[in-house]
Image: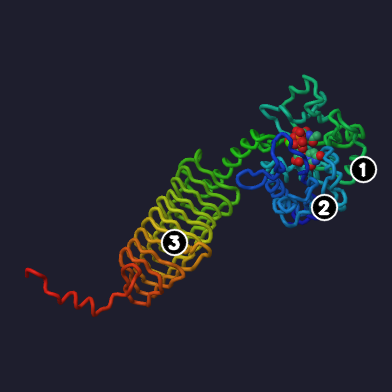
Amino acid sequence: MATRKRLADSWCGVVLAAGKGVRMNSARPKVLHTVSGVPMLAHATNAVRAAGITKVVVVVPPGGDSAQEFQAAAGPKARLVVQTSQLGTARALLAARDAAARPDSILLSYGDAPLITPETISAVTAAHTKQRSTVTILTARVPDPTGFGRIVRDKGGAVTAIVEERDATAAVRAINEINSGCYAFDAEWIWSQLPEIPRSSSGEYFLTDVVAAAIRAHRKVATVEAADHNEVLGVNDRVQLAEAERLMRGRILRRLMLGGVSVSDPATTYVDAGVTVGADTVVWPNTHLRGATRIGMRCQIGPNAILDGVQVGDDSTVVASHVESSKIGQRVHVGSFSRLRAGTSIADDVFIGNCAEIKNSSIGSGTHIGHFSYTGDATLGARVNIGAGTVTCNYDGKRKHQTIIEDDVQIGSDTMLVAPIRIGAGARTGAGAVATTDVPPGATVVGVPARPIRPKSVKRRIEVPRSGS
Ligand code: UD1
Ligand code: CA
């Protein structure tokens, strides 16, 4: 705890996110592209914060269009500063100087590196502090160094420079130790050096040139090698974006499985970064768990399920169905082939069967909607049974209207409930009824338009002698 506090006081995290991202060929800023449902910039800033650095400055491009999206990705407490002209990583860090105020040390990372973990960042800050270095570089030995800056060392193994690929000789290109883009700097020194960096052959000001400057000034430059080289993947194009997605997906599934979730086929299971799943739940193949989905314990999800922003209670099943922005209680069954649209709230012990569409509705406990049907803008009580083919006719061509079905109602197959309408507790509708007005509690209505069955008329019908008897 004490270490955490000291880190928070003496460090400032800076995340560079102002690059043009030309290689993405996208109208969207590169760092706002998502990996496992979360913008790359959010992965990068979350890792810095999770390493105990609470003060975070994010350097963003000019043009206010995406300002809100940048802030949402970086988190509400992050300070955003604009880099007015995108002249390279050295100028980007310089843009953060005033906002960073006066920390002892800077932890810098790039917004296009979504896989760097908090543990690795902590290893960099710890080594930097312990060795009292001026610069600490996170490096990695990679199978294919193409596109990365190479770490050049002298015969004794000491770092002498980072050389960008475009400036590298064939011998330097052959080096497989690369610069990750994550560094720790002595704050005072880096601010004094940045304005001194010369323009590179590409016309940009490369932050990586500060390393050679530090060596010339006999300052200490240290390195920390990433335990897993996959962490340092930088996303410059959509091929690398897909690769980052694959790696992140594997990491998320592994965390779930180690936490007690069975994933029957990891190759066809897609889980976003923010999703939680309780122990002893089984996720079956071809299942997508997106957004802020939270699944309870002992559930069966899939095969072929898509859940986006859904909360599911313990012991529930969702099979071959699509559920969005909804809440599902405990011991609920959904599917196959049902669609729960936004704003649906399902209480405990509900059974939603085949081909049911439900939208913006609340379904009371113990209710059954077993077969193909449409329930929209409705409130259903407890222990209701909805017969096959029932439709809440909620739209009159101009406006949407509410349907209220109270406890213990039995809706006969193929009933049309023309909203606005209220069906009183314990009432019944006959098969094929078209209910256009409210039905009192306990009543039975039949026909088109639906009318109550009078107990008297029922009796008279029974009394009529059958011909031939
Ligand atoms: C950079 C490093 C390279 C390293 C690699 C790791 C430099 C000069 N090179 O190369 O040594 O191996 O990352 O992935 O730093 N950015 C700004 N403003 C700018 C330019 C860039 O904020 O003017 C941001 C980008 O949004 C990006 C990051 O800085 O998040 C890195 O820029 P990028 O152009 O992707 O650098 P690389 O060529 O990948
Ligand atoms: Ca990059």
Q: Residues within 10 Å of mark 1 (few under 14, many from 20)?
A: few
Q: Nearer the viewer, mark 1 or mark 2?
A: 1
* First in residue order: circle 1 vs circle 3: 1
Q: Spot the residue most to the left.
A: 469
369 to 66, vertically: above or below: below
Pick whichever of labels 3 and 2 is earlier in the sequence. Answer: 2
Which residue bears the numbered disc 2? Answer: 10
The earlier-in-sequence mark between 1 and 2 is 2
Alpha-carbon span between mark 1 and mark 3: 66 Å
In the picture shown, does residue 332 fall above or below 41? Answer: below
Q: Secondary structure at mark 2?
A: helix
Is residue 468 visible in the rendered image? The answer is yes
**Residue position for label 1:** 192
For the C terminus, the quadrant is bottom left
Q: Position of residue 132 (x, y in %)?
A: 84, 43
User: Which disc is residue 105 wearing?
Assistant: none
For badge 2, the amino acid type reads Ser
Quarter of the rendering occupied by the N terminus: bottom right
- Find out if the beta carbon at label 2 lies less than 8 Å from the nearest ligand 1 atom: no
The amino acid on which the numbered mark 3 sits, given as a three-letter code, is Thr
Please provide percent x and percent y for residue 2. Answer: 75, 57
Q: Where residue 60 sits: x, y (%)?
A: 78, 47
Would you say 169 lies left or right of 41 here? Answer: right
Find residue 375 and name its label: 3
Mark 1 element type:
helix
Pick the residue in front: 243 or 336: 336
Question: In the image shown, does 239 or 109 lie closer to the viewer?
Answer: 239
Label 3 packing within 10 angstroms: few (<14), some (14-19), many (20+): many
Q: CA distance from mark 1 to mark 2?
A: 18 Å
